[in-house]
Amino acid sequence: MVSKRNLNIVRLLVQRESGWGHKAFFNTFHQTALELAEHGILQRLQKEDLCRSLDDLSNETESVFNIEQSRNGHYAATVQTNKSVNIFQVSTMNKIAEYHTNERSVWTLAFHPVNCNIIAFGTLGGKVFVYVDGQKAAWLEEHAPIGSLCFHPVDHYLVLTSGNEVTFWDWQNDTVMNTGTYNDCKCRFLHITTSSILITGISQTTLFASAGIGKNLATVEPQYMMASFLRTINFMLDSLERGCTIGNSFDSELRKQFYVWNHLLKIIANKRDEPHCFYTVAPEAKCMKSYLNTTLVVLNRRIDDILENLERCKMHKWLSFTTRCVSDNIIDKHCHEPMMYFERICSNYVEQRYSGYIRYIFDLTLVKNILHKIFKLYLNFGYQTSLLEPWQESDVPMDSSIISHDAETKNQFLLQAWDLGCHRDASDLPDFKEDWKNVISICSINNDSNVSISQCELFIASVRIKAVKELEVRSLDRANFGECMFIFRFVVNFVSLSFSPSGRYLVVGLRCKKRLKFAYILDKDSKWKIGVNFCLDPNSTESQDSAASSSNELVGLRLCLPKESFNYKEINCIKWAALPGYGLLIGLKSKFMQVCR
């Protein structure tokens, strides 16, 4: 389970004392030490029951449903249904503080990333409290429950979400800046990395799903066609990805999205000369910049994944069309006219009606690659672009072809990244209505514990609901942003997930039927499931339920908390302790939490 490289910790210590102190060596030593500490915990979990109840919470506590830790791992905070927050010292798990809100239950909380003596929490009643050194320092009241909050690591403000608004609150000077999402959207996850990248989880809109795409493209002003282009591609790829997972629906999805694509490129070609573009503007002119390279890189990668998936499945029965190879010259001819529009607006100042200028900054090659790949997809499957109006040729209702089904989007959220270094005042906050920008994944979120970011901040884990539930680990590194690093499929309900300190392992809390409630521990490097080999009588009803509960059950191991399932209390939240070797912190549906180490 531990990396094959440099396994001898003694040798590493000797090398360190000999002066091998360069950064690469230190990173190797640090990573190996973390993995060895985690390996020890996993080995012990296979042999003994390490779960211990922490039964010093208030008697009226009914359920521990969220646990957060300070960045240095020294403190853990719990929220439960007794309208209070409890702070524990992780090394001893002694309670050192308790904060009462006299409000509705606390839903979200966060430690300051630099000063662990600063903590903020938000309630279902819409109030936010900041405590410094055990004393209430500031509070704010919002109009709706607080969904999530986080501190900026450098600047003195707190980011929080309430209803369809995201608030930037300078809690020391009591100043507030607000920016909103669509009316039917909510934000359920916020996290700011040490490099000032804000990660958000915002629900997919249904009311505004067709804004600026489909039939509405004809009414979009030419200066905003770039946004419509990117938004349309996102909806198109969502539909095609869903069709690839279901199988026999891919043909119909491909047909519907072809008409959307054909119409989009026709409108762009017709409006290619209309934007008023300038190489320079007056220094005092109001100008909004839109950096698009990250978005374009992610879209290119998603298209590659679809093409690779189709190549693998080309022999399957559900792929009824006969594919053919279309030459690059033919594809280049189709790309020529749309590219004239993108060349016109690229890095120029595009005049907006009533509001100054917008400057789209992106690599033209990335756009050309997207056009080339999508044309290749359609042309290879026999679809030909036409100058005819697609609505006259198709019986496909365009609105229904691009709007996702309610049942599939009810709990689906877009994970996105926003560079806060580019936003310094109220007039330049991120536009959270740009649901096509810097998308990491589409996932299911209920509260903060449904998304996990590794301590190194290079990986993010979430669960996406397709034909089955898929736990995805994706990259946050700029070099391969959004790339999928690991996938684990299961069919039971999940409640929480968390990275180990090394970032190699993940623990996933599951809520299964009957008494089969357990957690998986996953090794993303070996792409295998690990844990306690929970032996059952193969003829028992419990064993049969276990085999049916997951398609992966027969090839892996599972961790049951505690080891004897009849003592099990339902999991609300599970977190890997941030300090290496300190095990797991488990919030249970009971009046106590458990420590597993």
Image (tube, grey):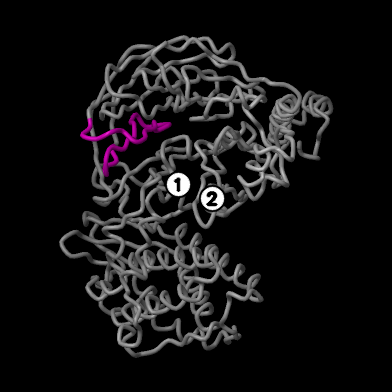
In screen coordinates, is 259 left or right of 5?
left
Which residue occupies the extreme left position in the image? 354
Q: Which residues, given as a range, are shown in magenta?
A: 142-167
Residue named by callout 2: 469
Residue 577 shown left or right of residue 61 in the figure: right
Task: Judge by depth and name the residue closer to the eye, 232 or 401.
Answer: 401
Kindly identify which numbered label has been placed on residue 297. Answer: none
Residue 510 x/y as whole percent: 55, 37
Q: Earlier in the sequence, mark 1 or mark 2?
A: 1
Q: Residue at x 21, y 54 (%)?
A: 284
Q: CA distance from mark 1 to mark 2?
A: 9 Å
Amino acid type shown at disc 1: Ser
Check disc 2: other Cα within 10 Å, few if <14, some if 14-19, many if 20+.
Answer: some
Q: Is residue 511 above or below residue 173?
A: below
* Mark 2: secondary structure: strand
Residue at 55%, 22% (x, y): give it. 73
Q: Which residue is mark 1?
A: 444
Above or below residue 198? Residue 228 is: below
Q: Residue at x 23, y 60 (%)?
A: 282
Q: Residues within 10 Å of mark 1 (few under 14, many from 20)?
A: many
Q: Is residue 166 magenta?
A: yes
Amino acid type at image mark 2: Lys
Q: Determine the image quadrant of residue 178.
A: top left
Q: Quadrant of residue 23?
A: top right
User: How far across and how far down the image is residue 374, in percent?
Assistant: 49, 75
Q: What residue is at 72 percent from the left and 34 percent from the top?
A: 536
Q: Quadrant of the N terminus?
A: top right
Q: Position of residue 389 (x, y in %)?
A: 31, 87
> Is 462 a magenta residue?
no
Label 1 secondary element:
strand
Q: Nearer the viewer, mark 1 or mark 2?
A: 2
- Pointers 1 and 2 in contact (CB under 8 A)? yes
